[in-house]
Image (cartoon, rainbow, N blue to C red):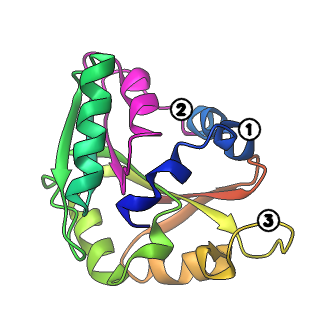
C-alpha cells in the first residue's frame, strides 16, 4: 500500500475488524524484547509493540516508503515514545541488524512483497537463533472477508513460500476475526 493509503491504516473501525491486541496477546511478547514491525506504515502496530516491550525493549519500525516513516516519526514524537528505531528498508532487504530481533511481525504486509524470497532470506538473517517470524494475513479461504482477493493468503500458500527459505511453521492461530496468525521459527 502506498503512503497515500495511510488513512485506511488508521481507520477508526480497524481495532474491531482486526483485534490487534488479541494477536499480540497470542504472541506473548516479553518486556525487554527486540521486535521488528516490518512494513510498519503509519505505526498502528508499532505503538502497541513499543508498549509491550517496555522501556528496556526495542522496536525496529521498518518501511520502504520514506513518507510512511515520516508519518510514523511524527506519531512517536507526539506520543513521546522513545524505544522505537525507524529503519528505511528496500524491496529486497529490511535492513535490520543481523541476529538482533526476537520477533518480526508482518501485519497484512507479506502479500505486498515484490521480491518475497530475497526479503525472507534477509528477515531470517536478522532473527536471533530462536527468533520468530509472524505473518498476519487475511484469510483467502473465507470469501466473506471484504478484502481484495490478491490481498489475502491461504495457510498453504504462506507455508510453501516461507518454509522454502528455511523457516518452520510452528503454529497457526485462527483467533482473529479476519486474519490468520502464522508463527514461523527460524
Of residues 73 and 34, the one nearer the viewer is: 73
Tell me which corner region of the image, top left, top right, bottom left or bottom right, holds residue 67: bottom left
Q: Are marks 2 and 3 in contact (CB under 8 Å)?
A: no
Residue 29 point in image, percent of width and height: 46, 31
Q: Which mark is residue 186?
A: none
Residue at position x 39%, y 40% in the image: 43
Q: CA distance from mark 2 to mark 1?
A: 20 Å
Would residue 127 be visible to someone looking at this image?
no
Question: Which residue ends up furthest to the right in the rendered image?
Answer: 144
Nearer-N-terminus badge (3/1): 1
Q: Secondary structure at mark 2?
A: loop
Nearer-N-terminus badge (2/3): 2
111, above or below 85, in the image: below
Residue 162 point in image, percent of width and height: 45, 75
Q: CA distance from mark 3 to mark 1?
A: 14 Å
Find disc 3 in the rendering and name its residue: 145
**Mark 1, other Cα within 10 Å: few <14 / some 14–19 / many ≥20:** few
179 relative to 80 in the view: left or right: right
Residue 118 point in image, percent of width and height: 26, 81
162 relative to 13 in the view: left or right: left
Of residues 100 and 6, the one nearer the viewer is: 6
Nearer-N-terminus badge (2/1): 1
Query: Magenta residues?
Result: 27-56
Q: CA distance from mark 2 to mark 3?
A: 27 Å
**Mark 2, other Cα within 10 Å: few <14 / some 14–19 / many ≥20:** few
Find disc 2 in the rendering and name its residue: 28
Q: Secondary structure at mark 1?
A: helix
51, above or below 100, in the image: above
Amino acid at each position: 500500500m502506498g503512503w497515500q493509503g495511510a488513512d485506511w491504516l488508521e481507520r477508526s473501525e480497524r481495532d474491531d475488524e482486526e483485534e490487534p491486541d488479541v494477536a499480540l496477546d497470542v504472541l506473548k511478547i516479553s518486556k525487554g524484547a527486540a521486535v521488528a514491525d516490518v512494513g510498519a506504515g503509519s505505526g498502528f502496530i508499532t505503538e502497541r509493540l513499543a508498549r509491550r516491550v517496555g522501556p528496556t525493549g526495542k522496536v525496529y519500525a521498518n518501511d520502504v516508503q520514506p513518507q510512511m516513516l515520516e508519518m510514523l516519526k511524527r506519531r512517536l514524537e507526539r506520543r513521546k515514545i522513545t524505544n522505537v528505531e525507524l529503519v528505511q528498508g528496500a524491496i529486497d532487504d529490511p535492513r535490520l541488524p543481523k541476529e538482533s530481533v526476537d520477533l518480526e511481525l508482518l501485519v497484512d504486509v507479506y502479500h505486498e512483497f515484490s521480491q518475497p524470497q530475497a526479503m525472507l532470506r534477509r528477515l531470517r538473517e536478522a532473527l536471533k537463533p530462536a527468533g520468530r517470524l509472524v505473518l498476519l494475513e487475511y484469510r483467502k479461504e473465507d470469501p466473506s472477508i471484504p478484502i481484495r482477493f490478491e490481498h489475502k493468503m491461504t495457510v498453504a500458500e504462506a507455508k510453501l513460500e516461507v518454509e522454502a527459505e528455511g523457516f518452520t511453521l510452528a503454529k497457526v492461530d485462527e483467533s482473529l476475526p479476519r486474519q490468520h496468525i502464522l508463527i514461523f521459527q527460524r
